[in-house]
Image: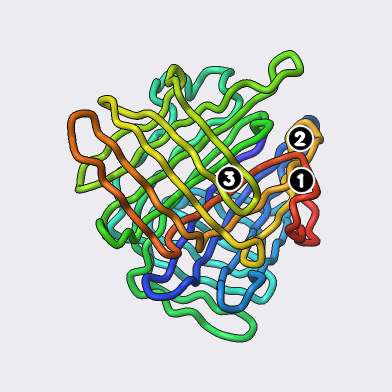
Amino acid sequence: MYESFFLRAVSPSEPVGAWIRYTVHKRAGQAPRGSLWCTVFDAARGAPFMHKHTSATLSAPAGEWIAIGSGEESATLGPWLAEGGCGGARWSLRIRDAEPELRHIERSWLYSAPLPRTKLTSPAPAARFDGTIELPDRTLELDGWRGMLGHNWGSEHAERWIWLHGLDFAEDPGGWIDLALGRVLVAGHLTPWVASGAICAGGRRLRLGGLTARGVRVAESPGRCSLTVPGQGGVLLEAHVDSPLSSCAGWRYADPDGGEHDVVNCSVAKLSLNLRPRAEAALTLHSGHGGAYELGMRERDHGVAIAPFPDG
C-alpha cells in the first residue's frame, strides 16, 4: 500500500508556490519506508527547487498525522502545523482558516471497500498558511498564503490521473476548486475518465462528478488540460489550465505493485473556469497563477525532466 499527506501554498501576489509531500510505501513482506518531498515553484526563475529524502524512521505522533525522518532530514504534519527539512530546505508553517473536509468519494462506505483501490480526501480543500520556507539561496515569508491539505492512500495508483486545484480567483477571492480524475485498467482496457471533487463559488459548495456521472470530457497533456465535468443540481463545469513546461516539476512515483508512473505537477498554473448552473447565469473565474495541475502517466516522452530521486 501507499499513503500520502501533502500541502500546497501559493503567493497571492506572484507566481511562487510550494508543494510538500509526506509519503509512506509498504511493500509485501517489507518494512514501511517514508519519504519527504519538497518542491518550490517560481515561474520567474524557471525550473522549480526539488528535493526528496527517504527514511525508515516514521511515526504518527499524538496530535499529528505523520512524522518522517530524523535530525536535519525530518518533518511532521498535522491539521494545524507543518514543520521540517529536506535537502537544504526547511519549513515551519501554521495552518488556519481551513475549510471543512472534502471527501471526494461521495459514498462513505466505499472508503472501507476494496474498490476503488485509491482513496482520497482533502482534510482542508482551502486554508491559509503563515510562516517561512527557507531555501539554500533565499527565504520565503508566507503571510496568509492560500492553499490546501490533501490525503490519499491505497493499494494501486490509477493508470492515469489528473489532480486540479485552484483558488485566488479574481472574480471570487474566496472561491476554490478541488477535483481528481482517473482512468483505470480493466481487463487490459482503460475505463473512461471518472471525476470527483467539488467547487466553492459565491460561498456555496457544489459537488462535481461522481461514480455515475456521465458527460466527463478531458483533453490532457503535461502542460495543458481542458475538461468538462457535470455536477450537483445540473451544474456543468468547464476548466482550462495552462502550465508552461519550464515551470513544471517532474517526479517518478513507485506503484505498490512494482511499476512506476511519471508525474508532472505545476502548482503556479494559470486556470480559468466556466461554471454553468441550470437556469442560472454562467459564472467565469480566472486565476493567473493560483492553479495546481498534476498529470500521472506511463509515458516518458513528456518533455519534463524527472528529479533524480528514486521512489519506493
Tell me which numbered mark, 2 or 1, is placed earlier along the sequence. Answer: 2
Q: Can residue 83 be spotted in the picture?
A: yes
Query: How far across and how far down the image is residue 69, in percent?
Result: 66, 60
Q: Name the residue under label 2.
A: 27
Using a 10 Å C-alpha cutoff, classify the residue at mark 3 as few (fewer than 14 neighbours), some (14 to 19) or many (20 or more).
some
Q: Please name the amino acid that badge 2 sits on.
A: Arg
Q: Using the image as rendered, state which of residue 9 and residue 63 is in the foreground.
A: 9
Tell me which numbered mark, 3 or 1, is placed earlier along the sequence. Answer: 3
Tell me if label 2 and label 3 are in contact, CB under 8 Å: no
Tell me if label 3 and label 1 are in contact, CB under 8 Å: no
- Cα distance in 3D space between marks 2 and 3: 15 Å
Q: Mark 3 points at which residue?
A: 4
Name the residue at 46% across, 76% down.
132
Quadrant (top left/top right/bottom left/bottom right) for the N terminus: top right
Name the residue at 30% across, 49% down.
284
- Cα distance in 3D space between marks 2 and 1: 8 Å
Q: Using the image as rendered, state which of residue 113 and residue 118 is in the foreground.
A: 118
Using a 10 Å C-alpha cutoff, classify the residue at mark 2 as few (fewer than 14 neighbours), some (14 to 19) or many (20 or more).
some
Name the residue at 51% across, 75% down.
133
Tell me if label 2 and label 1 are in contact, CB under 8 Å: yes
Name the residue at 32% across, 59% down.
169
Vertical comparison of 112 with 91: above or below = above
